[in-house]
Image: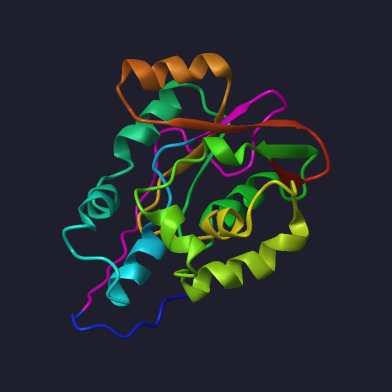
Amino acid sequence: GGHTLEDKELKAGLSVTGILKERVLLSRGAEPGDLLILTKPLGTGILTTALKGGRFSMDDLKEAIGYMTALNKDASEAALKAGATACTDVTGFGLLGHAYNMVKGSQLELVIESPQVPFMKGVKEFASTGIIPQGAYRNYEFIKDRVRFSRLVKEEVRLILCDPQTSGGLLVSLKKEGTEIFNEMKVPFYVIGHFREGEGTITVV
């Protein structure tokens, strides 16, 4: 796989291969009653689209750059210590695309409470005026038949939940008491939903 883009700067990529000796968290494994937490707010795709369109300055982008340059190391260590049952990161398929991988083919339903999902500053305003990357529309077309949306969830919010993220946060399923570990380790997190018995679906309310 890979990405194609047109940009002013030269890009270089690399890959690292190794052997993990410690516990590995997979995207599957959540259990009924688990909470779903997110460790970074959404919006990098929309904000960088606004930047390219001249609606946003590099100074305005400082918050997003801060999140994009922040490693998920502390969050992943907290997830392991908290006894997380599953974990995945939010990247090109957006929050809903990666969340769907946590329930696909399972006996679970994931309920996401959209008002609890954090957005970076300016994201909702830009989305409401149509400043949305093509990747978000493609992600939405893929996921819309796999997700039940409450009629109260506005179109722009649905698209933000599909916004492709650069260096997005982690989605972690864990027991309620596990959130105390995140608090103790001072790792930011947002409780955005919960798992219950179901048929491998997502409901957004």
Is 13 a magenta residue? yes
Whole-percent x and y of residue 21?
39, 37
Image point (56%, 17%), residue name: 176
- In this view of the protein, can residue 203 be seen by the observer? yes
* Residue shown at 70% from the left, 39% from the top: 110
Q: Is residue 192 above or below residue 43?
A: above
Main SS, magenta region, reads loop
Q: Nearer the viewer, residue 157 or 147?
A: 157
Q: Nearer the viewer, residue 8 or 115?
A: 115
Tell me if 87 is positioned left or right of 203 in this view: left
Q: Quadrant of residue 196?
A: top right
Counting every numbered tag in the picture gives: 0
Q: Is residue 142 above or below residue 71?
A: below
In the image, is 140 to the left or to the right of 6?
right
**In the displayed structure, would residue 120 be above or below residue 81?**
below
Residue at 53 percent of width and 35 percent of height: 116
Along the line of sight, which residue is nearer the eye, 124 or 197?
124
User: Is residue 136 a member of the stretch shown in magenta?
Assistant: no
Picture residue at 53% right of the left edge, 67% below the top: 136
- Please identify the quarter of the rendering in which residue 47 is found: bottom left
Task: Specify start and end residues of the magenta stretch as a single range.
Answer: 11-37
Choose between 196 and 84: the one closer to the eye. 196
One can see residue 92 in this view: no
Colour setting: rainbow
Q: Residue furthest right?
A: 199
Give the quadrant of the C terminus.
top right
The picture places residue 159, in percent across and down from the top left corner, at 57, 60
Please provide percent x and percent y for residue 178: 49, 18
